[in-house]
Image (cartoon, rainbow, N blue to C red):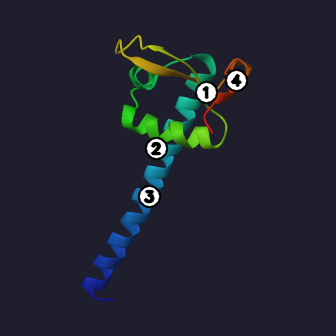
Amino acid sequence: MSAKNNHSSKKSFEKGQAKDKDFKRYSTQLKTIFHYLQNHTATASMIAMATDIPQKSICRYKRSLEKEGLLYEVEKKLCKATNFRAWYLTTNPELFSKVEPQKACK
């Protein structure tokens, strides 16, 4: 095998490893957010502060959990972290029944 082909194979292999690493990070962060919201009702900013997961990432995970019916917006009020109005989120099914139907995310 020539050096050029060997180098090309190495790059391809490294890309696969990067995808695995990204998936593991995604999976871990998603689980962290899900479990945090089982015991806390919080805004994305508050979750970011508590878990050290970037807020932009939390917004992506939030959408995924909403689509699966695992996360709901409970109420919109002042965020304790930013002092701006924001949605408080939960993954606790016991709190889903308290959410008004028109406010539930689909």
Mark 2–mark 4 Cα distance, whole angstroms, equals 28 Å
Instruction: Return the disc, 2 or 3, that comes first in the chain's sequence.
Output: 3
Does the rendering let one see residue 28?
no
Residue 81, position as x, y percentages in the image: 37, 14
Which residue is under mark 1?
103
Extreme residue toward the bottom, this view: 1
Mark 4–mark 3 Cα distance, whole angstroms, equals 34 Å
Q: Are marks 2 and 3 in contact (CB under 8 Å)?
A: no
* Crowd tier of the residue under label 4, counting other residues whose Cα lies within 10 Å: few below 14, some 14–19, many 20 or above: some
Q: Secondary structure at mark 3?
A: helix
Q: Secondary structure at mark 2?
A: helix
Q: Is residue 59 above or below residue 20?
A: above
Mark 4–mark 1 Cα distance, whole angstroms, equals 11 Å
Which residue is under mark 3?
19
43 displayed left or right of 102 = left
Q: Are marks 1 and 2 in contact (CB under 8 Å)?
A: no
Kind of residue at badge 2: Arg
Which residue is under mark 4?
96
Q: In the image, which is nearer the foreground, mark 4 or mark 1?
A: 1
**For the point 49% across and 51% down, which residue is it?**
23
Q: Secondary structure at mark 1?
A: helix
Kind of residue at badge 4: Phe
24 displayed left or right of 93 = left
* Crowd tier of the residue under label 3, counting other residues whose Cα lies within 10 Å: few below 14, some 14–19, many 20 or above: few
